[in-house]
Amino acid sequence: MSRKIQTALVSVYHKEGLEEILYELDRARVMFISTGGTRDFIQSLGYECKAVEEVSGYPSILGGRVKTLHPKVFGGILYRRENEADRKQVKSYDIPSIDLVIVDLYPFEETVAAGGSDAEIIEKIDIGGISLIRGAAKNYTDVLVVGSKNQYEPLLNLLKEKGGESNLDDRRRFAKEAFKVSSGYDAAIFRYFDADEGSAWRVGLDKCKLLRYGENPHQQGVFYGDFDALFEQLHGKEVSYNNLLDIDAAVSLIGDVKETALAILKHNNACGMASRSTVKEAWDAALAADPVSAFGGIVITNRLVDRLAAEAITEIFFEVIIAPGYDKEALDILMQKKNRIILIQKQLDNAIPSKQFRSALNGALVQDVNDSVQVLSDLKVVTDRKPSDREVEDLLFANILVKHTKSNAIVLVKDRQLIASGTGQTSRVDALKQAIEKANSFGLDLNGAVMASDAFFPFPDCVEIASQAGITAVVHPGGSIRDAESVEFCNRNGMAMVTTGTRHFKH
């Protein structure tokens, strides 16, 4: 069903890109209705434009809060062109037919992000605009709607292709985009009001990216979010579903470390990580922990990658490298692999959201992000022997690693180097045995190493096994009714134990 645009209501905050649209509409002999600044803009281009006040018979009131909210405006948008009763009422009340609505919304989220006052933020809650969008989108059978500057280009393409006309499929497509705008806008407002209570979680994501496939080739995958806001991709193929999961895990891990560090991740877990004075040295130490698992993994560092680091890293196959920057020589080396994904992580204060959610059953689980990082003052020594300064550094490093390792998790660290980890085991003892076996398989010396556990030890068996392997210090949350048995064993065998009071389950 084709409809010719005869009258367009245009009231926008963002005017960039509007000039070409107005030109095409004027060529199609479309009449303009507008408000305030948008009307001034239209007239400055030499086009005639009727004020909304002329249509409604009422001035803009309440400091501009009420301009378009009037039956003559909404009647012109919502009336059904094929409905005889609607046509009679429109004629009776002298309501003009409005066939195209171009509206965008006050920048609510931008004002929140900029730290605006509560009064400033409230004034950026759009009322007239959101109502116009919803009304026009509801009546898409007769009205074409543009609800965001992101739709300016598609509208311009449509006008160039079809002049002043649109068909039903066109109007439905634009209506879908309009409802996406309105749902996302309302979700953002709800989150602002609910920020301190967390009583519910509403999310509306406008940006989405169709992925090649999901976790496996037979599964379809889509990413909802703004990847480009967090990373600049310098090279390589498009990121995949599994790449995105690993990148998320890598960024979360490296974000908890302040000193120069590098980590290698596989299937969301670190298989190598070390802190050293240079990226090259950190790479060498991280790779030594598990050079087998490192193949095909994700590499991340929190320092600029130089030529020496790039030469070492590129000796093995890996899919993604993430860093805050690369020097030219390093990039030349890393780009030699056609499909290798090279990312610059942008340094943003609000890069990590305060909530995380995942699907479960027929709904979603939502929780606060685990942003708890233990420092020296959080460590409570519960044994006769206090850990040495070196052991304390390693215990804190290990505690960060175990926080980002799938439960049940055990992490072994020595000299700020991940020696081995046990991940995703149904038994904490099995996790420890897995870690010890892996360390032994690569010839890594556990004498003087430390152990971190993501949860307390329900029995002393883990510290007994650790002691036999040469481990000298332990960090865990504490809180078991049998903690005293583990502490007693450590005292008898010269081990140091500290508790944090903070569990780090990761399922």
Image (cartoon, grey):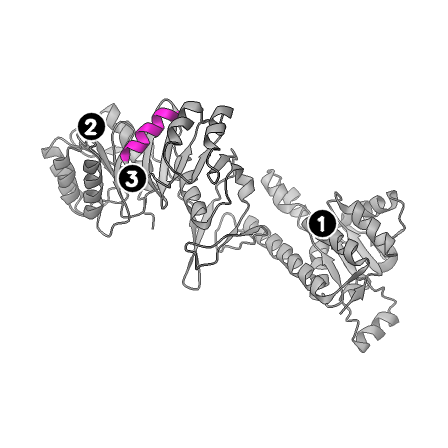
In the rendered image, residue 454 lying in the magenta stretch gets the answer no
Instruction: Read off the residue under disc 2.
Output: 386
Could you say whether the residue bearing mark 3 is in a helix, strand or loop? loop
Residue 67 visible in the current orientation: no
Which residues, given as a range, are shown in magenta? 279-289
Residue 466 visible in the current orientation: yes
Task: State which mark lies toward you, 2 or 3.
Answer: 3
Circle 3: is it few (<14), some (14-19), or many (20+) Cα within 10 Å?
few
In three-dimensional space, the C-alpha distance between marks 2 and 3, rounded to whole angstroms, equals 36 Å
Instruction: Read off the residue under disc 1.
Output: 153
Q: Point out residue 390 in the picture as x, y percentages from the top left corner.
A: 25, 25
In the rendered image, residue 288 lying in the magenta stretch gets the answer yes
Residue type, mark 1 in image:
Glu
Circle 2: is it few (<14), some (14-19), or many (20+) Cα within 10 Å?
some
Asked if 221 appears above or below 138 in the picture, the reply is above
- Horizontal relation, residue 226 to residue 409: left or right: right
Q: Quadrant of residue 403?
A: top left
- Horizontal relation, residue 290 to residue 82: left or right: left
* Residue situated in front as seen by the camera: 302 or 43: 302
Q: Quadrant of residue 84?
A: bottom right
Instruction: Read off the residue under disc 3.
Output: 292
Q: Point out residue 248 in the picture as x, y percentages from the top left corner.
A: 44, 43
Residue type, mark 3 in image:
Val
Q: Point out residue 489 in the picture as x, y percentages from the top left corner.
A: 11, 38
Could you say whether the residue bearing mark 1 is in a helix, strand or loop? helix
Task: State which mark lies toward you, 1 or 3.
Answer: 3
* Residue situated in front as seen by the camera: 344 or 187: 344
